[in-house]
Image: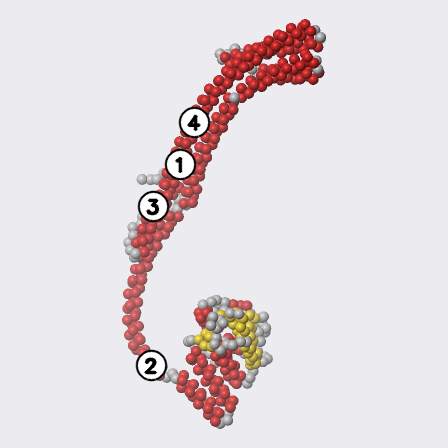
């Protein structure tokens, strides 16, 4: 069965887009409902305000009529200019109010009362004007007669106004009750509409959650099977192109790739087993050659004992310098062989550097000036073995070996709080930034075939420091540039016992 085009387009959108569309529709629906309810409530409020507005107008009409009558009476007694001015002002206001009353014959007792009041008010105002004019003309008999007629009309008008106000109030009360009933109906309608909107929103939310959760549940069940080693999972192809669909399709492809990879591994292991059999047969032929090669190696202890014997022989023949040289050679090689795989004290490391410098100065007629500065007790501080001699060797081989003048190497050890700072400095040809970066990144290799090298490179020293102390940034190199010398600094953290 084909899906509608709108559903197909929605399936191609992401979950975020779907949620935004659904939430926008629900919010728009809620907004429309609230606007409708708000407009209805405002309409009801306006009608309620208009209900009692007529009573307010009638009360104002009664007040103005009384003002006109009072000012006429005051003028008749005092004949003051202010009373006359007030009369004319209130008389004008009263005329404006009665002009708003009904003047047509209609089938309504309220409207007919308004017409009677309007007609009587016109007659009353004519009578008041006649009374004022008679007073101004000092015609006593005339203004007394006119005032009596005016007072009679005033009483009639007041009675009709009172009657109009009573009927209007009764009619407004009935209208108010009707409006209150309408408000109750509107309240119930609003609650019903809000409930319907809530149920509809909940239904849409549940449908959206179901469309997202069900594929995830299938995907989770398939993932558990794969985790248990069962790759024969039946995961249907996702029909949506949202995030869940993308993950489902990717998981299907991953499972297929894993199954294919396992098959390749199985085939590769079978081939490897066959190759292993051939290798075992080859190893059997190589063992005899390896044994003969090992037998041809010189025993290191035999070499040390021979060097010590040569040193004793030199002493017996009064060749003191030769004896010291041979003894230094024996100590140096013995330390290299014994300590390469373990650690040593810092004092032993410095003695190995002393022996190495002594041997080189004997070979090269004392061309290397060597100084050391030791501050503090270092006898019980243990460090990785063979970390100082390779640094000194590097300074000599690459720093001062090809110098025209005399080379100078200094070794200093300073104790600062909870660590040691070991500095090896030379006055050689220096290093560029690129050369320093290459050494620090391990991109250079020690030339083990160099006749003056022990075969331990700087990269080896850096790696062993990092592994021994389980820290980074323990080794640094600084140089001012060409012919500015090089300084290597090693930071050695101290343990609690060493501190």
- Residue neighbourhood size for the residue with mark 1, other residues' Cα within 10 Å, grouped as few (<14), some (14–19), many (≥20): some
Q: Nearer the viewer, mark 2 or mark 1?
A: 1
Between tags 3 and 2, which lies in front?
A: 3
Name the residue carrying label 4.
Answer: 184
| Location of residue 194 with respect to 148 vertically, above or below | below
| Image position of 180 with respect to 81: above or below | below
Q: Earlier in the sequence, mark 1 or mark 4?
A: 4
- Tell me the SS state at disc 4: helix
Residue at the spot of label 3: 214
Q: Quadrant of residue 404?
A: bottom right
Left or right: 241 with respect to 120?
left
**Separation (CA) of disc 3 from disc 2:** 68 Å
Which of labels 4 and 3 is toward the front? Answer: 4
Q: Which mark is residue 429?
A: none
Is residue 287 visible in the rendered image? The answer is yes
Q: Which mark is residue 291?
A: 2
* Cα distance in 3D space between marks 1 and 4: 21 Å
Location of residue 39 with respect to 57 vertically, above or below: below
Q: Is residue 457 visible?
A: no
The image quadrant that residue 8 belongs to is top left
The answer to whether the residue labelled 2 contacts the one labelled 1, judged by CB atoms less than 8 Å apart, is: no
**Residue farthest to the top?**
141
At a point 69% along the width and 9% down the height, the residue shown is 135
Residue bearing mark 1: 198
């Amino acid at each position: 069965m084909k899906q509608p085009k709108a559903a197909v387009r929605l399936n191609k959108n992401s979950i975020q887009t779907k949620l935004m569309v659904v939430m926008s529709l629900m919010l728009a629906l809620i907004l429309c409902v609230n606007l409708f309810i708000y407009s209805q409530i405002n309409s009801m409020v306006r009608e309620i305000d208009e209900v009692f507005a007529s009573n307010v107008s009638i009360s104002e009409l009664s007040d103005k009529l009384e003002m006109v009558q009072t000012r006429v009476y005051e003028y008749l007694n005092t004949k003051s200019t202010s009373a006359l001015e007030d009369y004319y002002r209130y008389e004008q206001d009263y005329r404006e109010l009665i002009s708003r009353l009904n003047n047509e014959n209609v089938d309504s007792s309220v409207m007919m009362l308004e017409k009677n009041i309007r007609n009587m008010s016109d007659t009353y105002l004519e009578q008041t004007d006649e009374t004022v004019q008679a007073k101004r003309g000092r015609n006593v008999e005339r203004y007394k007669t006119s005032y009596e007629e005016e007072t009679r009309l005033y009483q009639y008008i007041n009675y009709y106004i009172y009657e109009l106000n009573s009927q209007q109030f009764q009619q407004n009360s009935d209208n108010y009750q009707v409006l209150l009933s309408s408000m109750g109906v509107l309240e119930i309608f609003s609650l019903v509409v809000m409930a319907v909107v809530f149920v509809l929103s909940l239904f849409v939310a549940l449908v959206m959650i179901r469309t997202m959760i069900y594929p995830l549940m299938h995907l989770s069940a398939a993932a558990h099977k794969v985790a248990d080693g069962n790759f024969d999972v039946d995961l249907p192809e996702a029909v949506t192109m949202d995030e869940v669909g993308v993950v489902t399709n990717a998981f299907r492809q991953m499972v297929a790739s894993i199954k294919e990879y396992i098959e390749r591994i199985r085939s590769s292991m079978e081939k490897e087993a066959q190759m292993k059999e051939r290798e075992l047969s080859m190893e059997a032929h190589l063992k005899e050659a390896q044994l003969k090669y090992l037998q041809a190696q010189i025993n290191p202890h035999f070499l040390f004992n021979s060097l010590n014997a040569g040193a004793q022989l030199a002493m017996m023949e009064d060749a003191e310098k030769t004896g010291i040289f041979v003894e230094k050679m024996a100590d140096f090689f013995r330390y290299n062989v014994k300590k390469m795989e373990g650690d040593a004290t810092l004092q032993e490391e410095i003695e190995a550097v002393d022996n190495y410098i002594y041997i080189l100065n004997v070979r090269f007629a004392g061309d290397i000036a060597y100084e050391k500065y030791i501050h503090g007790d270092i006898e019980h501080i243990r460090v990785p073995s063979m970390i100082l001699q390779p640094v000194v060797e590097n300074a000599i081989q690459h720093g001062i070996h090809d110098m025209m003048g005399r080379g100078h190497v200094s070794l200093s050890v300073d104790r600062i709080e909870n660590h040691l700072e070991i500095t090896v400095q030379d006055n050689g040809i220096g290093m560029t930034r690129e050369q320093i970066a290459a050494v620090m990144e391990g991109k250079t290799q020690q030339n083990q075939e160099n006749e003056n090298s022990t075969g331990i490179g700087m990269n080896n020293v850096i790696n062993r420091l990092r592994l021994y102390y389980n820290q980074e940034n323990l080794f640094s190199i600084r140089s001012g540039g060409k012919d500015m010398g090089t300084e290597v600094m090693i930071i050695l953290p101290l343990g609690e016992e060493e501190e």
